Amino acid sequence: MSAVSTSQDDTKALYKELRVGASLAVRFHSALAAYAGINITDITCLGALDKNGPMSPGELAGHVGLSRGGAITAVIDRLERAGFVRRGRDATDRRKVVVELVRDGAYARLTATFDALGHSYIETIEQYSEEERDLLLEFNRRVNARLQERIGELQERA
């Protein structure tokens, strides 16, 4: 077998594993949502709030790709009923509503489950050398940038 053929096989195998990983990530988030009694869109919103802090409903909708208005309101209503978020007033403009994560209770139980996966990821990552981790980090940043570009293109067409 030639070096070019082996390289192409390796590329195809890596691409296949990336697709498997993406599919498993969706399945994991779906299972996590079911465990929490919410849906996968709700999980995505919780992730956005965890990463970015309190935000307006419109900002939250933009982060997760939902329409402003009814769709995001329904998500916030569900999350509020389940004890994951609360609505409050913006500190600088009392007319504005902000949505913030309630970090104890339901969210704490959810993150304990999610953190277990994070710890196993860290254990796996730590098995690589610093140079290998640098390469993996660069690769993932590039892949994520490509994915973000494609998401934007699809959202523009929708």
Image: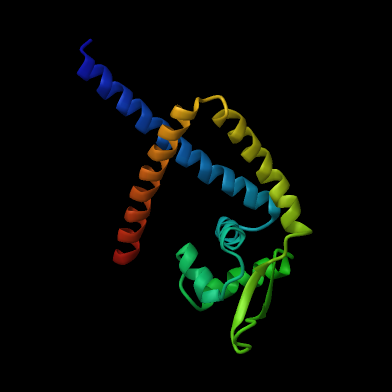
Q: Position of residue 44 (x, y in %)?
A: 55, 57
Q: Residue at x 50, y 70 (%)?
A: 61
Q: In this figure, what is the number of numbered marks? A: 0
Q: Quadrant of residue 104?
A: bottom right
Toward the viewer: 92 or 3? 92
Residue 6, relative to residue 84: is it above or below?
A: above
Residue 136 at what x, y percent from top left?
43, 34
Above or below — where is 128 with respect to 113? above
Left or right of 64, for residue 105 = right
- Whole-percent x and y of residue 73? 58, 75
Residue 27 shows up from this direction: yes
Q: Nearer the viewer, residue 48 or 82?
A: 48
Residue 99 appears in which quarter of the rendering? bottom right
- Residue at 35% across, 63% down: 155
Instruction: Place residue 1 in its image quadrant.
Output: top left
Asked whether the viewer can see residue 158, the reply is no
Residue 57 lies, with reference to residue 7, above or below; the image says below
Q: Nearer the viewer, residue 132 or 155?
A: 132
Q: Identify the residue at horizontal 36%, vertical 56% (top origin).
A: 151
- Residue 150, given in percent of the width and then of the height, sits at 32, 54
Q: Which residue sits furthest top?
A: 1
The C terminus, quarter of image: bottom left
**Farthest right residue in view:** 105
Q: Is residue 82 above or below residue 145?
A: below
